[in-house]
Image (spheres, coloured by chain):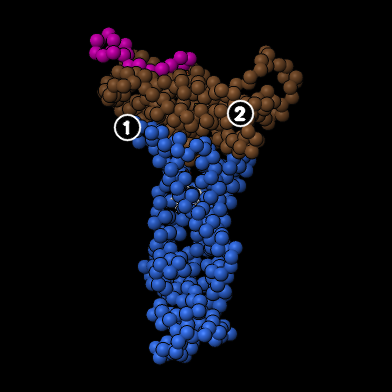
Chain colours: A brown, B blue
Amino acid sequence: MNFTLHIWRQENAKAKGHFETYKVSDISPECSFLEMLDILNEQLINDHIAHPVCFDNDCREGICGMCGLYINGRPHGNDDGITTCQLHMRKFHDGDEIWIEPWRAKAFPIIRDLVVDRSAFDKIIQSGGYVSVTTGGVPDANAIPVPKRFADMAMDAAECIGCGACVAACKNASAMLFVGAKVAHLAMLPQGQVEANERVKKMVCKMDELGFGSCTNTYACEAECPKQIKRQNIARLNREWIKQLFAGNHKPEE
Amino acid sequence: MDTNKLIKISSITKKLLVALFGAFLLVFLLFHMCANLFILAKDGGEAYGAFTHFMGTNVIVKVLEVVLLGTFLLHICLSVYLWWQNRKNRPVRYHQTSRTKTAKGSKLAIISGSLLLVCLIFHFYDFYFVKLNFVEGTYMVKTEEFMNSEPDQEISEEARVAFMNLINDGKTSKDMQWIRQISAEDKAVLQEAFPKAEFEPDFYAMARQKFSIWHIVLGYLVFFLVVGLHIRHGFESAFQTFGLNHYKYSRLVEILGIIYCWVVCLGFAIVPIGVFFGL
Ligand code: HEM
Ligand code: SF4
Ligand code: FES
């Protein structure tokens, strides 16, 4: 298969970026999207055309969340419930033009080309997405009884891999699905409940501070989440927030 | 300057307030729609007049009126503020237009809301501003006010003629309690002669008169369509914002939203249509 690629190139965070057009040919339909980019980069290096295109990736099996690319108007490309590394060229047609952009959000500044700095997510987690006491190793399944329904919901929420597609897709660059997933998954388990009020307060304040938008219930995040995290987690985040509002004045330590 | 610091409440709380005020407006809208149905009654405005008289004079209603206006204002200010803030969170836009599949209602909320505001100003001009004496309309007055009020001076010939004309033209209600459909000119003349008489807007007459003109009817139908667009999203959205979204019951909320939307819009629409076609 042959493709024309329009790729966002940008030297560094400050530089002015632009689209560069490249052609790749003889790509196997079984090739993954990132492998296709590898082939392109080999060409660029071997033929001394340009600095290879920088893009993030790690596991290449849909579990690390590093590989976010905005492809033809959709985060992670034109398929549901997958990361970019799980996208294959058979999803495209021979001769397609493919536009590749980095995530665009104030809170995710571009480092180079298609690589963005997602450490804002880490900062949100650091602000409260944890349980303060050591909870030990994995307890026996029957040691702390959790109703199956809650265990399932917590597990679904915990699937979030922090890829940032929700922010990339949202017209407000809102991180509510991510924060919702993190808050919900801890709030539904006994270990997380002690700090639930403080956690939601700290994480939401951090989210606002870092320049993520607010939710307008558009649900673009849900449509693009590779782990299909549901909007109900945002509702739970709102619920936890309301609970926190009425729960009295916890002063989070500095 | 980071304008987010101007209002030091979290984005979720702001959104909660938008939804809270929005929900209050939803309740008001249902009430407004039900009251309007009285305009369809062919009783010369007996029922609707009694209603508007109550709404115009009751103290609690007057307080609620201020609350309602405040609610509108806060809903609009907060939602526009949030929208403005949200635009800034993506300083560099995507080159490609988004192909993410989402419902359009939310993205259109700011447009439907702004259109709604424009329609609302026209609507206020038609009715509410008459009550505030910003514009002239048609008036009604209790007959007894004339009987009780001592004219300060000799009643002018002009006022006497105007008064007699109203009586002779059958502008009094069946029980003779009210004189209705008083034009702005007559009102001015009579008010001078009877300074104590309290004239109220005759909304029944005004509505019936306005809804006999086709382009006003059409304008109002567009208004209701815009309202429908906004609340079709707003109803469900408010539930989500309050955190009331459940895997099991979200479908129920959606259905309730659709029912609410159609009931309110059709309920509103039936009045101008009905009056226009002489129902
Ligand atoms: C008059 C001008 C109005 C403007 C400019 C306006 C604007 C907006 C905007 C921008 C939103 C945010 C939508 C979102 O982000 O999800 C919104 C939400 C909403 N509006 Fe309005 N609106 C107006 C009037 C009304 C009226 C008359 C009603 C009630 C009948 C109403 C009910 C709602 C509701 C229920 C929501 C959803 C609240 C939420 O979940 O955030 N609005 N409005
Ligand atoms: S919620 Fe979904 S889209 Fe957002 S960061 Fe987590 S996995 Fe990615
Ligand atoms: S590279 Fe790890 S999820 Fe794609």
* C-alpha separation, residue under disc 1 versus residue under disc 2: 44 Å
Horizontal and vertical percent position of residue B237: 53, 45
Q: Which residues are magenta?
A: A41-60
Q: Tell me which corner region of the image, top left, top right, bottom left or bottom right, holds residue A106.
A: top left
Q: Amino acid at mark 2?
A: Lys
Horizontal and vertical percent position of residue A21: 26, 23
Secondary structure predominantly adopted by residues drawn in magenta: loop
Return the residue found at the far front: B152
Disc number placed over residue A251 in the picture, else none: 2
What's the residue at 35%, 32% (across, down)?
B91
Tell whether circle 1 marks a residue whose Cβ is less than 8 angstroms from ligand 2.
no
Horizontal and vertical percent position of residue B270: 49, 67
Return the residue found at the far top: A46
Could you tell me which secondary element the residue under label 1 belongs to? Answer: loop
Residue A79 versus residue A73: which sits nearer the camera?
A73
Mark 1 closeness class: few <14, some 14–19, many ≥20 residues within 10 Å: few
What's the residue at 46%, 71% (across, down)?
B207
Q: Chain of mark 2?
A: A
What's the residue at 55%, 35% (across, down)?
A234
Tell whether circle 2 marks a residue whose Cβ is less than 8 angstroms from ligand 1.
no
Q: Height in image: B262 above or below B9? A: below
Q: Chain of mark 1?
A: B
Residue A18 versus residue A62: which sits nearer the camera?
A18
Residue at mark 1 shares a chain with residue at mark 2: no
Q: Tell me which corner region of the image, top left, top right, bottom left or bottom right, holds residue B27.
A: bottom right
Q: Is residue A144 magenta?
A: no
Q: Amino acid at mark 1?
A: His
Where does label 1 land, which residue?
A: B95
Q: Is residue A56 magenta?
A: yes
Mark 2 closeness class: few <14, some 14–19, many ≥20 residues within 10 Å: few
Could you tell me which secondary element the residue under label 2 belongs to? Answer: loop
